[in-house]
Structure formats: C-alpha cells, structure tokens
Amino acid sequence: MPGRGRASFTKRQKERSRQDKQREKLERRAQRKLEKPAGGPDDTSDLDFSAAAAQWELPGGASDEQTDE
C-alpha cells in the first residue's frame, strides 16, 4: 500500500512543530518573568495604611465588634 508511511512522517513533523512552539512559548514566558519590574502593581511595600489603622482605632470599629459564638 503506497502512501502509508507519509502519514506517519507528517504526524511526526506536526508533533515536532507543536513541541517547538510550546518550548518557544515557555522560553518567552520565562524571559518576561525575568524582565518583570520588581515593583509591579502587586507590590504593596510603599502603600500607606495609616488611614486604615486610624479607622480601626475609632469607637465602633471592627475591633469593637463581637462575634456570635
């Protein structure tokens, strides 16, 4: 049966191509992770929580509430 081996070769080629693309994608993702700035939007080290602390100290704040246990 001629032509039977061609399908296997094509499948291997497609699989190899898929693996190469996946590897390249992982490399790009790792590169972006390395280049990510240290102080991103999730960095809360420079936020001022003094207003929240003052709110907690007010009468009727969350620290004064009692739980129903």
Image (spheres, grey):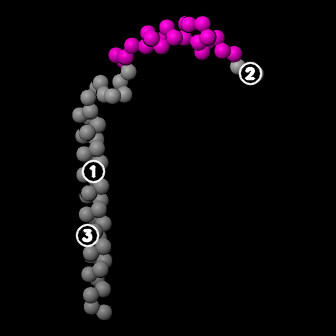
Judging from the image, what secondary structure is the residue with disc 2 in?
loop
Q: Which residue is mark 1?
A: 25
Residue drawn 33% across the image and 28% down it: 41
Is tag 3's residue or tag 2's residue first in the polypeptide sequence? Answer: 3
Between 43 and 8, the one nearer to me in the picture = 43
Judging from the image, what secondary structure is the residue with disc 3 in?
helix
Q: Badge 2: how crowded within 10 Å, few (<14), some, or many (20+)?
A: few
Task: Tell me residue 40's x, y (percent).
Answer: 31, 28
Which contiguous range is marked in magenta? 45-66
Quarter of the image with the N terminus is bottom left
Distance (Cα) linking label 1 and label 2: 52 Å
Image height check: is 44 above or below 34?
above
Residue drawn 24% across the image and 40% down it: 31
Is tag 1's residue or tag 3's residue first in the polypeptide sequence? Answer: 3
Tell me which amino acid carries mark 1. Answer: Lys
Residue drawn 30% across the image and 59% down it: 19
Task: Tell me residue 36's x, y (percent).
Answer: 26, 33
- Residue 13: image tag: 3
Q: Main secondary structure of the magenta part?
A: loop
Q: Badge 3: how crowded within 10 Å, few (<14), some, or many (20+)?
A: few
Q: Badge 1: how crowded within 10 Å, few (<14), some, or many (20+)?
A: few
Q: Quadrant of the rendered structure where residue 38 is?
A: top left
Between 61 and 69, the one nearer to me in the picture = 61
Q: Are marks 1 and 2 in contact (CB under 8 Å)?
A: no
Residue drawn 28% across the image and 44% down it: 29
Q: Are marks 1 and 3 in contact (CB under 8 Å)?
A: no
Judging from the image, what secondary structure is the residue with disc 1 in?
helix
Q: Are marks 3 and 2 in contact (CB under 8 Å)?
A: no
- Residue 68: image tag: 2
Task: Tell me residue 17's x, y (percent).
Answer: 25, 63
Distance (Cα) linking label 3 and label 2: 66 Å
Q: Residue furthest right?
A: 69
